Amino acid sequence: MSVTLIVIIAVAVLLVLWGISVQNKLVRSDELCKNALKQINVQQVSRYDALQALVKLTREYASYEADTLQKVIAERKVTSSAVPTVAEVDANEAALRDIGAKLIAVAERYPELKADENYRQTMQSIEKYEENVRLSRMTFNDTVTSFNREVRMFPASLIAGLLGFAPREYLAEDTTKKDYPAI
């Protein structure tokens, strides 16, 4: 066997090993992105459940208002698909924000509701889920930044293109103020 053939085989083996390494890294990063997006969805579903509990509390003080809110919530059910898309997560966030605003408006009209200990505890849990969603969104966008960097940087971009990896979409920046009233 000639030295040239050995060198060619060695280079080919190194290229194949490098390609496998890049592919594994891309898959790992892609899975991290999917997981980060799913974590946001989990927090949104938890916040949705807490909002449902708040509607039940509201029913004790104003059944008409609670029935109206229940209809609003039913129309805006948060999706909990296995792997949500960025658009679904953003749509969930808009729906939750709308529901929260309507609940706050009701609570403002009923001071005795705001004074209720269960109301306070439920609002605290909603605020906790709100913060968890905010942190999860930041984690997702950081994960996407890392993934997109891997997909776009040469020479890994060659393997990424061949294997169908494309840059991922970021979650939209939430420009609305989401502070719930002080309890």
Image (cartoon, helix red, strand yellow):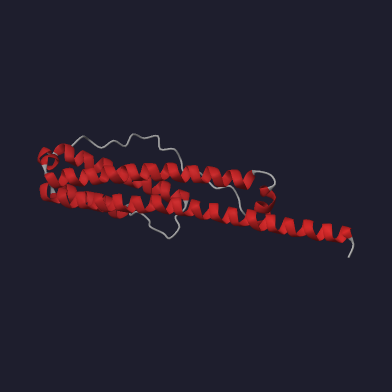
* Quarter where residue 19 is shown: bottom right
In the rendered structure, the answer to whether residue 145 lies left or right of residue 116 reads right
* Quarter where residue 9 is shown: bottom right
In the rendered structure, the answer to whether residue 175 lies left or right of residue 117 reads right
Task: Look at 52% across and 45% down and name the residue there.
Answer: 144
Relative depth, front residue between 106 and 54? 54
Observer able to see residue 164 = no
| Place of residue 6 in the rendered image (x, y in percent of width and height, measured from the top left) | 84, 60
Task: Look at 17% across and 52% down and name the residue there.
Answer: 56
* Quarter where residue 154 is shown: top right
Observer able to see residue 34 = yes
Identify the residue at the far right of this view. Answer: 2
Tell how many labels.
Answer: 0
Eyeballing the image, is 127 above or below 77? above
Relative depth, front residue between 14 and 158? 14
Identify the residue at the far bottom of this view. Answer: 1
The N terminus is located in which quarter? bottom right
Task: Look at 29% across and 55% down and name the residue there.
Answer: 74
| Place of residue 112 in the rendered image (x, y in percent of width and height, measured from the top left) | 9, 40
| Place of residue 61 in the rendered image (x, y in percent of width and height, measured from the top left) | 11, 47
Relative depth, front residue between 14 and 107? 14
The C terminus is located in which quarter? top left
Task: Look at 44% across and 50% down and name the residue there.
Answer: 36
In the rendered structure, the answer to whether residue 162 lies left or right of residue 41 reads right
Relative depth, front residue between 135 and 21? 21
